[in-house]
Amino acid sequence: MKKFFLMPIIFIFLSTILLADGPLVSFKSTGVGTDNDLEIVLHNIIYNDYANGVTYKLWAKFRFDLYTLSFIVTDAGFENSSNPGNVVEDTLDTTSNSAIDFNTGNKFNNFSVDESADISVEPWCVNSVGLCGNYVDIGQKSISNVTTSDIPATGFPYNDLNNYNLGYYCEPVLLNHTYINKNKDGSYTAFVITGHQKIGQCDHTVTVKYKNLN
């Protein structure tokens, strides 16, 4: 039987595709091919869908074939490698349902907000989103990756909820920034405004994604 000898082949490939809003797709593959044709090389492709808070992983296994001197795919698959939790998407509109109770998902119109909601969109005559609530900005972190460990110990307008007033803290918020709200019942919710449209001189429609943390 003819015996084949092959110098060890070391293949390392690392690249990152950068789009306008940061790294989106990254590729990384490491492996060693030798004169043992059972050598396996694993190739992973990670895709981060920041808009929807989901991370996907595409993977493949290769075997180096000594007869053809090439890698042959032996197995492949696709999986959602993140744990997005219960991420909910909803729409708030200053002309109708401008406020939401995160724990129940109930929405309220401009005239019945009072203390029944956790955040409320303001009908301000500005181009940005004005939002009332009890929240802290934690930056551009994927909402699917936010856990209770991200809850700030301080910084909420109302740390003490005994005197909670929804309309007390109303500020402009940034699109695609993740905020954590300390709700009226003491629970916490991570939310992000992913879409905004000014529909009148002072009216707004916003798309909000949120995940209750406890």
Image: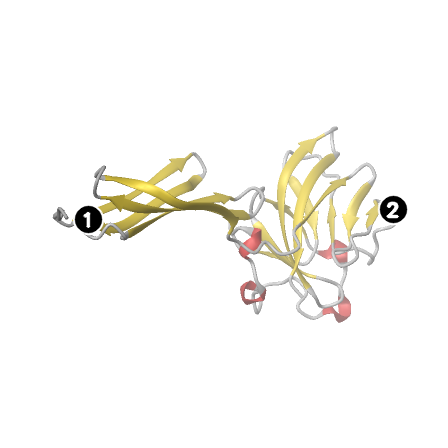
Query: Residue 122 appears at what percent x and percent y?
Result: 74, 43
Q: Is residue 107 left or right of residue 17?
A: right
Dot label at residue 93: none
Check whether the beta carbons of the residues at disc 2 and disc 1 lie within 8 A of each other. no
> In the image, 110: left or right of 34?
right
Q: Residue 111's mark? A: 2
Where 198 sits versus 75, above or below?
above
Going 63% across and 63% down the picture, which residue do you hit? 156
How many dots with numbers? Answer: 2
| Percent coordinates x, y for residue 76 in the rendering | 43, 45
- In the drawing, does residue 200 fall left or right of residue 39? right
- Figure quadrant of the C terminus: bottom right
**Which corner quadrant of the image does residue 147 belong to?**
bottom right
**Residue at image mark 1:** 10
Which residue lies most toward the right here?
Answer: 112
Task: Please tell me which residue is depicted at 56% across the width and 43% down the height of the picture.
Answer: 176
Q: What kind of element bears circle 2?
A: loop
Query: Whole-Å distance between the Cαs marked 2 and 1?
Result: 68 Å
Please name the amino acid that badge 1 sits on.
Ile
As rendered, which of 94 and 46 lies closer to the eye?
46
Name the residue rendered at 27%, 53% in the picture. 39
Residue 180 is situated, as x and y percent measured from the top left of the image, at 62, 58
Element marked by disc 1: strand
Q: Is residue 28 above or below residue 195?
A: below
The answer to which quarter of the image holds residue 109 is top right
Tag 1 or tag 2, which sits nearer the N-term? 1
* Residue at the extreme top of the image, as rendered: 200
Between 138 and 46, the residue placed more toward the observer is: 46
| Residue 17 screen position, x and y as percent | 37, 37
Residue found 71% across the figure and 68% down from its top: 186
Left or right of 195? Residue 201 is right
What's the amino acid at mark 2?
Phe
